[in-house]
Image (cartoon, rainbow, N blue to C red):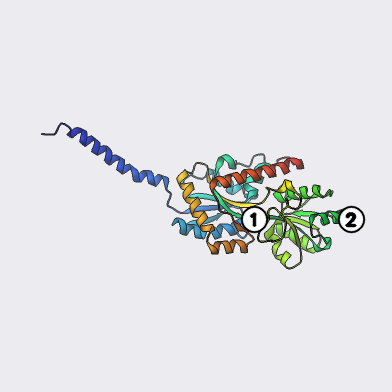
Amino acid sequence: MLHPDAPLALSRRRCLQVALLALPLSAAAQTYSGPIRMLVGYPPGGPADTAARIVAEKLAVQLGQPVLVDNKPGAGGQIAAQALKAAPADGSVVFLSNTHTVAMVPLTMKAPGFAPATDFRPLGAVANFELALAVHPKTGASNLAELGTWFASRRSDASIGVPAPASAPEFIAGEVARHLKADIVPVAYRGATPMVTDLLAGQISAGVSGISDFLQHQKAGKLRILAVSRATPLLPGVPSFAQAGLASLDATSDFLGLYAPAGLQDATVARYNTALNQVLALPEVVAKLQASAMTPAAGTPAEQAQRLAQVSKALGALVAQSGFVPQ
């Protein structure tokens, strides 16, 4: 004969069994354990790809999962950004991007196909990748004021090259020209390499691009870097644009960040951020990034989101001041 409380006890036991069976399924739903694709919006060999491969190798060790770099070049990173937006929000796909894609493209394109603030979740910062203003030795300039004087006396020879149209370097170059009261329209190239080639040959007198494009030539005495978007230990003694008198360029530094689709769960975001920061603290990672003219920039997802908002605001002001009309 059953005890009067037996049906109730049996019911409770069955509920407990169901709950215990459900726990592994819930945990599995929250923790993705398969291979991770790290999208990069540029071809192999550039700064974003270089950083991605340095980070992916060590991130795989920290997470205990394969991390595979997946290059999807084209349209200033738009193809990769759109692929991230369409990816499942389960941790299987992340996106390592520079500020051009996540800040400049939305400012200069009418329909980029993604909105970083609502379509992406920052996982953390990866590295700082500063922009710089470099000049040919023929200018004799060692600072912005001297460059302005040279521009005024050599109007027919005054020019500033940039690696791409509608890029941060183009708007920075335009702001430099306005600051120096020089009637100069930035010369847009199709890539940094041809721009630097012309700068080395003296075909243009100045250029704005990533410091990695100028650093070796500065060391060889073939170019002189006058200012950078943000002071960096890679160029001790070289002032930031703000320090050189261009306060409007204070928040325009370039950086690489890691992003996921907007719906990624908080627990996975925290897990990936912790692993990323651990990777960026490794001496060999620091050395490799610095060898490629980048400096590690660990931080929280919230800090990365705030910095992206600040850079977007600063670049937006430059775009508006230039009169540029989104295409």
Q: Secondary structure at mark 2?
A: helix
Q: Position of residue 30 (x, y in %)?
A: 42, 45
**10 Å neighbourhood of mark 1: few (<14), some, or many (≥20)?**
many
Label 1 sits on a secondary structure element that is: loop
**Figure quadrant of residue 219:** bottom right
Q: Which mark is residue 160?
A: none
Mark 2 packing: few (<14 Cα in 10 Å), some, or many (20+)? Answer: few
User: In screen coordinates, is 67 left or right of 146?
Assistant: left
Residue type at mark 2: give it. Ser
Figure quadrant of the N terminus: top left
Number of disc labels? 2
| Residue under the point 58% across and 54% down | 297
Q: Residue at x 40, y 44 (%)?
A: 29
Cα separation, mark 1 vs mark 2, equals: 33 Å
Label 1: which residue?
Answer: 129
Residue assigned mark 2: 153
Which residue is nearer to you in this view: 243 or 100? 243
Counting from the top left corner in percent of width and height, residue 168 is at: 70, 49
The spot of residue 55 in percent (x, y) is 54, 58
Front residue (pair 307, 50): 307
